[in-house]
Amino acid sequence: MTKEEKTMDNLRKQTSDFECTTHENGLRQPEKTWITFLHAGFEEHWLPLTDWDGNDIFWSTENMRIAKTIAHQKFGGAKFGLSPCNQKKIGNSCVDNF
């Protein structure tokens, strides 16, 4: 297994570290990682960040290193911000590269 395959396997593992939204019925749903770009409606326009196979990246402390790496690889030198769903809704970028 290559280093990239191991990274993707770790990304898919469900851990208690995922930030979750708790719905009215008590069910918890992991929050996706969203990306916004400085040059294209920063903190107003968001896209879900996915891995190379189109799988969602869920927000967690461990996944942020992976998410930033994937965003740098996919979008080169673009200035971006990352957030979980709850922060995206209020227009707040939690992690950025500038």
Image: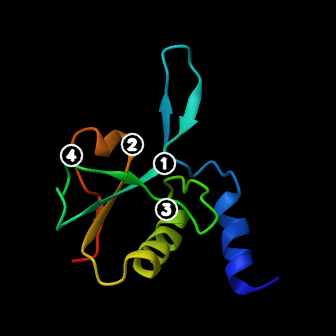
Q: Determine which residue is flagged by label 4.
A: 91
Which labelled disc corresponds to residue 61? 3
What is the quadrant of the C terminus in the image? bottom left
In this view, 53 is above or below 97: above
Q: Determine which residue is flagged by label 1.
A: 32
Q: Determine which residue is flagged by label 2.
A: 85
Q: Assign a secondary structure to mark 3.
A: helix
User: Mark 3 or mark 4, which is nearer to you?
Assistant: 4
Q: In the rendered image, which quarter is residue 76 located in?
A: bottom left
Q: CA distance from mark 2 to mark 4?
A: 10 Å
Label 3 neighbourhood size at 10 Å, few (<14), some (14-19), many (20+)?
few
Q: Compare marks 1 and 4 and give the one earlier in the sequence.
A: 1
Q: Compare marks 3 and 4 and give the one earlier in the sequence.
A: 3
Q: Assign a secondary structure to mark 1.
A: loop
Q: Compare marks 2 and 1 and give the one earlier in the sequence.
A: 1
Q: CA distance from mark 1 to mark 3?
A: 13 Å
Where residue 88 appears, as percent x and y from the top left, is 30, 45
Mark 2–mark 1 CB contact (< 8 Å): yes
Identify the residue at horizontal 68%, vertical 51% (top origin): 14
User: Mark 1 or mark 3, which is nearer to you?
Assistant: 1
Q: What's the colour scheme?
A: rainbow
Q: CA distance from mark 1 to mark 4?
A: 15 Å
Where residue 60 appears, as percent x and y from the top left, is 51, 56
In this view, 22 is above or below 24: below
